[in-house]
Image: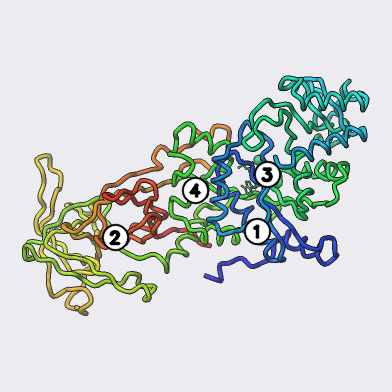
Amino acid sequence: MAETINTSSNFIKNIVKEDLAEGKYKDIITRFPPEPNGYLHIGHAKSIVLNFELADEFRGKTNLRFDDTNPLKEDEEYVQSIKKDIEWLGYEWDGYHFASDYFEEMYNRAVLLIKKGLAYVEDMSQDQIREYRGTLTEAGKESPSRSRSVEENLDLFERMRKGDFQNGEKVLRAKIDMSSPNINMRDPIIYRISHTTHHNTGDKWCIYPMYSFAHPLEDAIEGVTHSICTLEFEDQRPLYNWVVEKCEMESVPKQIEFARLNLTNTVMSKRKLKQLVDENYVDGWDDPRMPTLSGLRRRGFTPESIKLFCREIGVARADNIVDVRMLEHFIREDLKMKAPRTMSVLHPLKVVITNYPEGEVEWLDAEVNPENEEMGKRKIPFSREIYIEQSDFMEDPPKKYFRLFPGNEVRLKHAYFIKCNDVIKDDKGNVIELHCTYDPETKSGTGFTGRKVKGTLHWVEASHAKEAEFRLYDSLILDESEGKDFLDHVNPDSLEVAQGFVEPNMVDAKENDKFQFFRHGYFNVDPKDTTADKLVFNRIVELKSSFKL
Ligand code: ATP
Ligand code: MG
């Protein structure tokens, strides 16, 4: 497994190395700054792995900071789920903060900007502000509010805080440069009015700082040295630096951008994922088809597989799309040695072995995992009645069909050869039962070499079998384009449910236990819907893939 780990250094590592060597920073501090407006997804995992492992490598620290500056969309439920997911991945944060803890300080820094003549209260509406902002090819126009006196600005800003104005009536803007080629620098809004209860500060505030003003201050307040974000913030870097400088922050963080993770057949934005949840396309944020960490966990992905994947994809500055099958590759690799192997029948067809004594049961030996001897052996019951997979029988097979058909002999995995003699049907002509005979000479493990058969079938003994539900997944999104109409590309057949059987040795299976079912793939015991009476299994991934790393 070691050879698949990407140990090559990423460009951010090199920047940190240089900064430390040059004495620019003594120790490094990174942060993971989620907005608690949704559940974390696999893209966030890339950022988490990067921030925590980078700090770790240089004996630095990593803070978890909730970027909770937009009370309309944020919620305590999301805060809890984010903490749980990071812990599940196995990381421990050093500092634990909320942007909202710094609201007072941010307010004071905004006042400082006003006093320095670098911020002003704007009366124009959102639309007017946009109109005045200009375009990529056209300079913006200065607003009449821009020439307000410091005193008047201070007074108005204080009254904004007190609640004298309605939402949208006024905003605070940084006074930078309306003709800057970078639109972000054309007097960006840094505070807005929102009479909304905040999940953390309640009704204490009715003005909230904008992300692009708040974020650099949060980083600087915490002494973050390397503020790593995704590429779309590149154009905001001059503003980031402007805020840190003009607000006279003692500690000066450095913003570094990297390419966000995109996956084939996957939508990743929280807004879209929320829409899938709210409009019932899926069964919640932790639906096993979702690319959320809670969905992947419920599907059966392990923290190790996700971390190996994140390390392997590396960190670059160019946007790209990663094949989702690469993520699946890592869960197969992780479970290959760890998961017990057992048999299950997803779509059962009963087989009566007519020459096997009635009422008798024998217990056959099988390895728990042939790739990992340490996992020992298990016992499998065998008797006169068993279930096989419906798709392993054909009454009228094409050439080169090596499974069961009238007159043909196959091997039952871990047991005997059986031969099909009779096909029993209901009045509609559907096959409901097969009558076979077995050959006691052919018992598995006895070294029988008398003759060969081409097909090996999995099976489950009927009287001891445990009922189980199997959930088989396909891509939730058929088209990989993250277009506007992604809902048109939701796969209507992304979930298939099968009612079948598992071996009796699985009665003790607990939630989130993982198994390899012979020929069917890796499965996870569903933590939500499994009951004392019925096991529910989520297929994590099939056994084989054409994907090559
Ligand atoms: P989304 O666009 O999915 O809603 P976001 O960037 O708005 O995500 P945040 O909560 O602001 O979500 O993200 C927290 C951190 O995770 C940020 O530093 C962000 O850059 C990073 N991040 C988000 N999505 C990805 C991704 N697809 N790949 C890598 N990092 C990501
Ligand atoms: Mg965001």
Q: Is label 3 within 8 A of ligand 1 (CB to nearest ligand atom)?
A: no
For this view, does 290 lie left or right of residue 99?
left
For label 2, the SS is helix
Nearer the observer, 13 or 136: 13
Q: Which residue shows up at 52% across the image and 46% down it?
A: 292
Pick whichever of labels 3 and 4 is earlier in the sequence: 3
Residue at 43 percent across and 64 percent down: it is 335
Q: Where is residue 206, by image quadrant?
A: top right
The residues bearing labels 2 and 3 have C-alpha atoms spaced at a distance of: 45 Å
Element carrying mark 1 = helix
Of circles 1 and 3, the one toward us is: 3
Sequence-wise, the earlier of marks 2 and 1 is: 1
Total numbered labels placed on residues in the image = 4
| Residue occupied by mark 2 | 506
State whether residue 448 is above or below residue 408.
Answer: below
Tag 1 residue: 52
Mark toward the viewer: 3 or 4: 3
Name the residue type under label 1. Phe
Depth check, mark 2 against mark 3: the one in front is: 3
Q: Quadrant of ligand 2?
A: top right
Q: On the image, numbered disc 3 is attached to which residue?
A: 98
Instruction: Give the numbered dot on residue 294.
Output: 4
Instruction: State the separation of the CA atoms marked 4 and 2.
Output: 25 Å
Asked if residue 70 lies left or right of residue 401, the reply is: right
Disc 2 packing (10 Å; few <14; some 14–19; many ≥20): some
- Using a 10 Å C-alpha cutoff, classify the residue at mark 3 as few (fewer than 14 neighbours), some (14 to 19) or many (20 or more): some
Q: Identify which amino acid the numbered label 3 is placed on.
A: Phe
